[in-house]
Structure formats: structure tokens, C-alpha cells
Amino acid sequence: MEETPTAAAKLCDFCGNPVGKGRSDKKYCSEACRSEANNQNKLPEYIPAINNILVKNWKILKDCLGDKEMCKMRVRDLGGRGFNFKFTTAERINDGDGDCYYFVYDMGYLLLDQETRVLIVQDDTMVRLTGPAYPV
Ligand SMILES: [Zn+2]
């Protein structure tokens, strides 16, 4: 038989903090979180649609990189996997050489060879970046 989680262990559906004491079906830690969660449910349809594209793009970059530190591949092969080049979360400039990396969360790529190939990297640790973090 499953144990009912204690009030202390139960986490807010919105922010992830403990919900604290209250009704057993309490979902949020505060009125602010309950309100924000309700507001997010009212987002226009294109926002979750774009979020889905970003997640798909992230998964494709992650999958291409595998457990390597970086990898190169043809732009058309990346596109062939369903990568949508219109949607990224940030553009970051490499401090050293001025190269512009496009990031989808922590997965980034740099266009190479007249934009026929990409260099895929994970995280900012691969390049020294300046400019705005997230979002653009
Ligand atoms: Zn909360």
C-alpha cells in the first residue's frame, strides 16, 4: 500500500517548494503560486507550441552530441532530424574570437564553413561568452 506523503514532503506544483500544512489536496505553497499557475493555463496556444519546438530542438542537439564534448555535423543533417533553426533561447558571443553561438537552453551550436556545418557544444563552459544570458 502506498504511503500518503506528509505535508512537509509535498511540493508546490508551481515552484517546487514544500506546500506546508493545510488541506491534504493542497497543490501550491502560496496564493501567489496558485495565481501564477492559473495565469499560465491562460497562455495563448502559440506559447506552449513554441516551447515544444524548443524542447525538440534541445533534444536533437543533445542526441547529436551524445557523450562527446563537441561535435561537427552538416547543417542539412541537423535540419533533417527536425531541428528548427528559427527557435533558440539565446545568442551568445564568444569572448575570444567574436563567434556567435546559438543556444537552446544549455545546448549550443556555431555555424561553420559558410553555414554548411555546425559545431555543437553543451553549456557555456565550452566557450567564453559575453552578452546577455537568458533570454536574448
Ligand atoms: Zn510555490
Image (cartoon, rainbow, N blue to C red):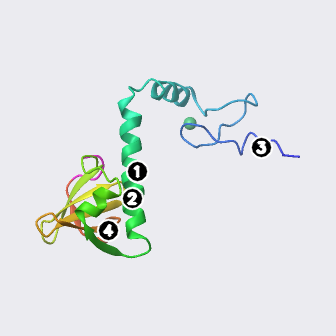
Which residue is tagged 3?
Answer: 5
The nearer-to-camera label among 2 and 3 is 2
Q: In the drawing, what numbered circle is on residue 60?
A: 2
The nearer-to-camera label among 1 and 3 is 1
Q: Is residue 133 magenta?
A: yes
Which residue is at the front of the view, 114 or 70? 114
Q: Are the two marked residues, 2 and 3, in contact with CB atoms closer than 8 angstroms?
A: no
Q: Are the two marked residues, 1 and 4, in contact with CB atoms closer than 8 angstroms?
A: no
Extreme bottom residue here?
68
Residue type marked 4? Val
**Nearer-N-terminus badge (2/3):** 3
The nearer-to-camera label among 4 and 3 is 4
Residue at point 69%, 30% (across, down): 26
Residue 50: x and y, percent?
Answer: 35, 39
Query: In the shown orientation, is residue 23 left or right of residue 17?
Result: right
Query: CA–CA distance between discs 4 and 2?
Result: 12 Å
On screen, residue 16 above or below 71: above
Query: In the shown orientation, is residue 130 left or right of residue 104?
Result: left
Q: Is residue 24 magenta?
A: no
Which residue is at the front of the view, 21 or 53? 53
**Which element carries disc 3, helix, strand or loop?**
loop
Which residue is tagged 4?
Answer: 121
Q: Which residues are magenta?
A: 132-136
**Nearer-N-terminus badge (4/2):** 2
Q: Quadrant of ligand 1?
A: top right
Q: Are the two marked residues, 1 and 2, in contact with CB atoms closer than 8 angstroms?
A: yes
Residue 130: x and y, percent?
Answer: 20, 60
Query: CA–CA distance between discs 2 and 3?
Result: 36 Å
Which residue is tagged 1?
Answer: 56
The nearer-to-camera label among 4 and 2 is 2
